[in-house]
Image (cartoon, helix red, strand yellow):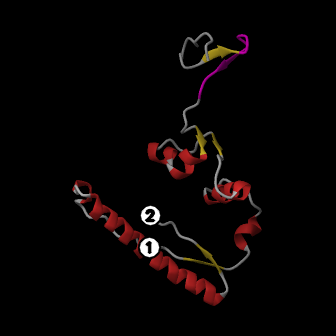
Amino acid sequence: MTGTPHPDDPAVKRAANDTLWMGVLPVYLAANSHAYMVSRLPEVLGTGQPYCMHATWTYGGAAGKVSRLREALLWHDPPEYYTEGSYVTVDVTVPEMPEDYNTWEENEPQIRFHLGALRAQLEQAAVGMAIAVATGRTFIMPKVW
């Protein structure tokens, strides 16, 4: 934007032959899906919900976008979508990070810790998957850290 700056805010400028004021919203207010869902920028900054969120490219095309939006509770589905069916969910226990973890100077122990933590969580999820298969229900994958 190269128009005349607004007297109260230099980040806002005149545009469209001086017929409107225009500015760029920060990413935490007009978030792309990576900033909102992966980086969780509004949550990290404590800014609350963004004004809007743009679903950027993801695996699975449109179906992948809908899945991500549903996970973030940003997709409108009829109530029966959430009430019909029979599901199994599990809460996995995340192994606690050692207090001195951030002082470790070697990468190998950190990698071993993370792989062990991941294995522990996936083993817990596998129990839920087995229960879902045995009972003919749908398994809802838990968050894995």
Q: Which residues are magenta?
A: 16-24
Q: Is residue 48 above or below residue 61?
A: above
Is there a contact, CB below 8 Å, between mark 1 and mark 2? yes
The amino acid sitting under disc 1 is: Gln
SS assignment at label 1 = helix
Q: Residue at x 49, y 73 (%)?
A: 91
The residues bearing labels 1 and 2 have C-alpha atoms spaced at a distance of 8 Å
Element carrying mark 2: loop
x%, y% of residue 139? 61, 77
| Residue highlighted by disc 2 | 145
As drawn, the label of residue 121 is 1
State whether residue 31 is above or below residue 94: above
The vertical placement of 5 against 113, above or below, is: above
Q: Residues within 10 Å of mark 1 (few under 14, many from 20)?
A: many
**Mark 2: which amino acid?**
Trp
Q: Earlier in the sequence, mark 1 or mark 2?
A: 1
Q: Position of residue 26 (x, y in %)?
A: 54, 33
Horizontal placement of 99 versus 86: left or right? left
